[in-house]
Amino acid sequence: MAEWVYEGKDESGEEGEGEGIGSKVEDDSPRLRQIGGLWILTSNTSIVPVGEALHFGSSARLDLEQEDLTSAPAPIGLASPSTGLGYWILFEDGLIESMGAVIGFEIPGTHESKAVAIAPNYRGDGLYVAFADGSISTLGTAIYHGSAIEMGLESPIVSIATSRDGYLMLCENGKVVNFGEAPFHGSVYESVESHQAKAVDIVSHSSGDGYWILLENGFVIANGRCVFYGRPEELSCKAVSILASPDGEGYWIVDENGGVHGQGHVTVLPGRNEIPEGAGVAISAALA
């Protein structure tokens, strides 16, 4: 059974609590949001298409046959526009590789901190790139609303999500920082501490009024308008990414072994996806 906890009252008006966070919905109706698939990025720059996602190529920056990759900049993030016609691969040194029919971007200058996450703006013609120290780069039509570099963060930034006319940055310790008109619905320090698991990813609700936060053990915290739809019942490895359904009625959780766990009213995608030999582990994902 999925772990959960009520955040206030459930649909019957009763209050209660359990082992998760967010309002739990038990509904077996066969409503599915038709998403073609998703892409998984591995630690050795391979792209693994899932479902009906098209393959637009993997990065040529690293040789999959190369044995020593310790000195090479690591791939760190993956993002795609709503068209599903390509994707961007982010490396920790800030380099962005464009695959398919997407706009090419280049981060000007250099950063002292490592790049950690990438997210497109709503139009798909701009990108936000977050760095571990809280700084941010805006590319294309993406609008700059500030950074967290001077906030004295106690934990590094690990993820970024766009929301309305703004964005949200997530720290490893569960702290959430909002910019622009992105609503703030709380941080998740207590969940991180109680589970002894790092926060790894954040994704916004399609309405912009809420967000889901994923911990490395697969635990999900729903904030704002978001509903908790469950977590993987059996997870033998770390969770790395959470992707929200466009209608806000569910999400997919991707683990480092390539597993895809659909929760809520979402399209059923292949649960186990073989990562090519020598390609490492999954580190990020994006919807097709």
Image (cartoon, grey):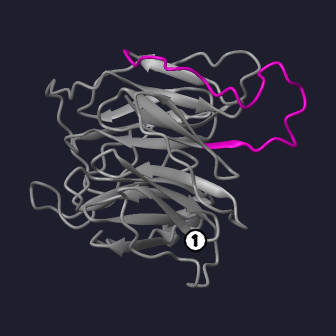
Front residue of 245/229: it is 245
Residue 288 in percent (x, y) is at: 37, 28
Q: Is residue 54 magenta?
A: yes
Q: Which image quadrant: the N terminus?
A: top left
* Front position in the image: 96 or 70: 96
Q: Secondary structure at mark 1?
A: loop
The residue that label 1 is drawn on is 134
What's the residue at 40%, 69% (across, down)?
A: 144
The residue positioned 64% from the left and 28% from the top of the image is: 59
For residue 178, which quarter of the picture? bottom left
User: Which residues make up the magenta segment?
Assistant: 52-76
| Identity of the residue drawn at 9% across and 55% down | 12
In the rendered structure, the answer to whether residue 96 lies left or right of residue 162 reads right
Does the magenta segment cover residue 97? no
Q: Is residue 20 visible?
A: no
Mark 1: give few (<14), some (14-19) or many (20+) Cα within 10 Å: many
* The quadrant where residue 153 appears: bottom right
144 left or right of 36 in image = right
User: Residue 3 placed where, x, y %?
Assistant: 40, 47
Most distant residue in the left direction:
12
Instruction: Name the main secondary structure of what is drawn in magenta.
Output: loop
Q: Position of residue 259 (x, y in %)?
A: 53, 26
Note whether 189 is above or below 108 in the view shown. Answer: below
Residue 166 vertical placement versus 257 (above, below): below
Residue 175 spot, x, y in % from top left: 50, 71
Of residues 171 and 25, which is closer to you in this image? 171
Amino acid type, mark 1: Gly
